[in-house]
Image: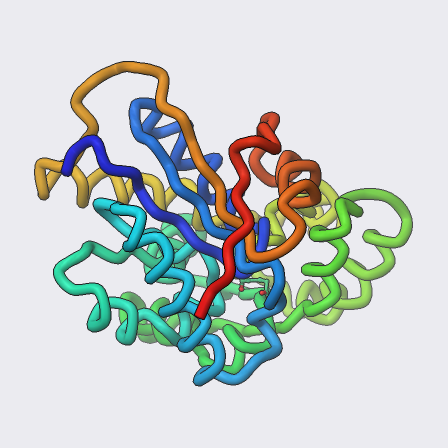
Amino acid sequence: MNDASIGIFDSGMGGLTVMRALMARLPQERFLYLGDTARLPYGTKSADTVTRYSVQAAGALVRRRIKLLVVACNTASGVALPALQEAFAPLPVIDVIAPGAEAALVASPRGPIAVIATEGTVKAGAYMRAIHARAADVVVTQTPCPLFVPLAEEGLIGGEIVELVAHHYLDPVLAQKPHALVLGCTHYPALKGVIAKVAGPDVLLVDSAETTAIRVEQRLREMDLLHSTAARPEHRFLSTDAPERFARVGEIFLGRRIDPEAVELVDLQ
Ligand code: DGL
């Protein structure tokens, strides 16, 4: 099983920011990424629908043989994790919320911590729970920023429009003087430049990608599932809509070229 891929899924291309951190940490591993672009966004849908979509997305990866699943979508991590763990046991499943909560507490052990995320993640209270499970007294606020997702998926990651939207969402959050701001949605790291500019130098931005990658490495090591050879791995991508667009826009999130030939169109059910 060591030579099998690490499966990653997200509702779209945002999870490629997590894959980027994973590739940097585990350069010998092969990745299989699924972006459910036909059904994005997950962040405004009900928990039942997101769970159903997540199980279908993970199923498509499992059928192609993976040794570990990364739920690189905060909304899916927040509502579908137990269903995924149950449906695909004993496959190890790593989410992005627990690592994000840990990273937030490293950045700001006493808070206050502000979380920005999709409506679904905020409604599920997933970050709040994960942070309070580790530090009950830390003040946590949660704010949905729904327009950030279509901006990032559109490749619009800087400039006047993005700054206006960032001010619209972040000014009330920043008025509460958080020490750390958690980018609790896989798409938000793509807008990090603008978010950092609006937040100013006193607020630490927390992105769970790096901590998630550390957790994946630990789990593979514990299970003795790390890839053994140093050959240059080939990565594959599955997209539920417009593979050409996936390859083109996905590069913004992955930070490197995606060969359109490596992207396969799939239908989930
Ligand atoms: N991937 C989602 C998340 O991290 C954001 C995009 C969406 O709403 O589907 O929450």
Residue 260 in picture, x, y percent from top left: 61, 33
Q: Is residue 12 visible?
A: yes
In this image, 78 relative to 193: left or right? left
The C terminus appears in which quarter of the rendering?
A: bottom left
Q: Is residue 52 shown above or below 68? A: below
Residue in view at x 29 percent, y 54 percent: 63
Q: Nearer the viewer, residue 5 or 261?
A: 261
In this image, 177 relative to 25: left or right? right
Residue 2 in picture, x, y percent from top left: 16, 33
Residue 240 in picture, x, y percent from top left: 56, 57
Q: Quadrant of residue 254?
A: top right
Residue in view at x 41 percent, y 40 percent: 210
In this image, 158 relative to 209: left or right? right
Q: Nearer the viewer, residue 47 or 238?
A: 238
Count numbered badges in the picture: 0
Q: Is residue 181 visible?
A: no
Q: Quadrant of residue 101?
A: bottom left
Quadrant of the image where one finds ligand 1: bottom right
Q: Nearer the viewer, residue 58 or 20?
A: 58
Q: Residue furthest right?
A: 160
Q: Nearer the viewer, residue 58 or 137?
A: 58
